[in-house]
Image: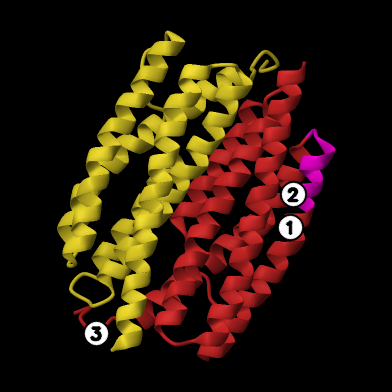
Chain colours: A red, B yellow
Amino acid sequence: MTKDKDLNDLFLDTLKDIYFAEKQILKALPKMAKAATSDKLRAAFDKHHDETEGQIERLERIFELLGKPARSKTCDAIVGILEEGKEIMDEYKGTEALDAGLLAAAQAVEHYEISRYGTLKQWAIQLRMKDAANLLDETLKQEKKTDESLTVLAESAVNLAAAA
Amino acid sequence: MTKDKDLNDLFLDTLKDIYFAEKQILKALPKMAKAATSDKLRAAFDKHHDETEGQIERLERIFELLGKPARSKTCDAIVGILEEGKEIMDEYKGTEALDAGLLAAAQAVEHYEISRYGTLKQWAIQLRMKDAANLLDETLKQEKKTDESLTVLAESAVNLAAAA
């Protein structure tokens, strides 16, 4: 029944999955920025919001390269990851631990994206879609850089605490 | 109402979250191993199953260090990530793309774990819980190594395809 499905189908399915995820992330980031108490953390979320818009455009270019309409497919993973972030925002609202929780939620999102873009890039290479591979690599590098910046923020909180 | 919650609470909540996640992963891995067609991929899942048992024990030691009972808290993120893996197993069963899909699902799991253990380790340092930080770092290193091995497997598939 499904014997005819191949890596092209899996690539397209996963593209739809991350397209859905990016759009959910785009909606979540302003809420996370609004909730953050640290200016640096808010600035990091605002910056990533702008980057996410560019990442969505890159995905739309890949759909074009494939000659397929840009469509979303519900991504249970990002729904769950963002739901956890929302719980943290609710449960830790007004507490000193809120920013730490927001940072952790954002890093879980970044790692999901890093995993998906890494996979899609490998498949694009395997499927000999060089332009798509380059676009995916561009986003992958951006996601890794964002995760590193968030780690620096998390570590600076550690250093502040250690110095206190 | 929640003003009194602090980083200690967030640490404990997140510990319960990853404890739940690890137990779900422990249940999912034998199913993924059974589904895999490549011997190398099956061996990687079996190996990670054993490692996961050790990671669960390390979490239980941290609960002990905290003087708290080892309890799970539903982790929506891992539920979503594993649900996606299950969908791949169903939709790509019997196809040539199944192993690629299983590998991708496993890497999404690894990245979630890397993000959570990285966060927990930082918080343990911030909370000056050296023994907990060391245990978390041990698991974090193991998860990163597992992700690297899975990347090598994914790349070897690429190389095989390129050589074909």
Q: Is A122 placed above or below A102 here?
A: below
Label 2 and label 3: CA atoms lie apart by 42 Å
Q: Where are the magenta residues, as a range?
A: A37-46
Q: Give the tally of numbered discs.
A: 3
Q: Do the dots labelled 2 and 1 sit on one chain?
A: yes
Of circles 2 and 3, which is in front? 2
Write the residue at 17% across / 67% down.
B37
Query: Of the residues shown, which amino acid type is indicated by label 2?
Result: Phe
Q: Bin the neighbour count of mark 2 within 10 Å (Cα to Cα): few under 14, some 14-19, many 20 and up.
A: many
Marks 2 and 1 close (CB-CB < 8 Å): yes
Q: Earlier in the sequence, mark 2 or mark 3?
A: 3
Query: Of the residues shown, which amino acid type is indicated by label 1?
Result: His
Question: Picture coordinates of residue B157 (x, y %)?
Answer: 31, 74
Label 3 and label 1: CA atoms lie apart by 39 Å
Write the residue at 26% across / 68% down.
B99
The residue that label 1 is drawn on is A49
The residue that label 2 is drawn on is A45
Q: Do the dots labelled 3 and 1 sit on one chain?
A: yes
Label 2 and label 1: CA atoms lie apart by 6 Å
Q: Main secondary structure of the magenta part?
A: helix
Could you say whether the residue bearing mark 1 is in a helix, strand or loop? Answer: helix
Q: Earlier in the sequence, mark 3 or mark 1?
A: 3
Query: Of the residues shown, which amino acid type is indicated by label 3?
Result: Asp
Q: Seen from this angle, which residue lies furthest top?
A: B67
Q: Is residue A124 left or right of residue A93?
A: left
Question: Picture coordinates of residue B56 (x, y %)?
Answer: 32, 29
Could you say whether the residue bearing mark 2 is in a helix, strand or loop? Answer: helix
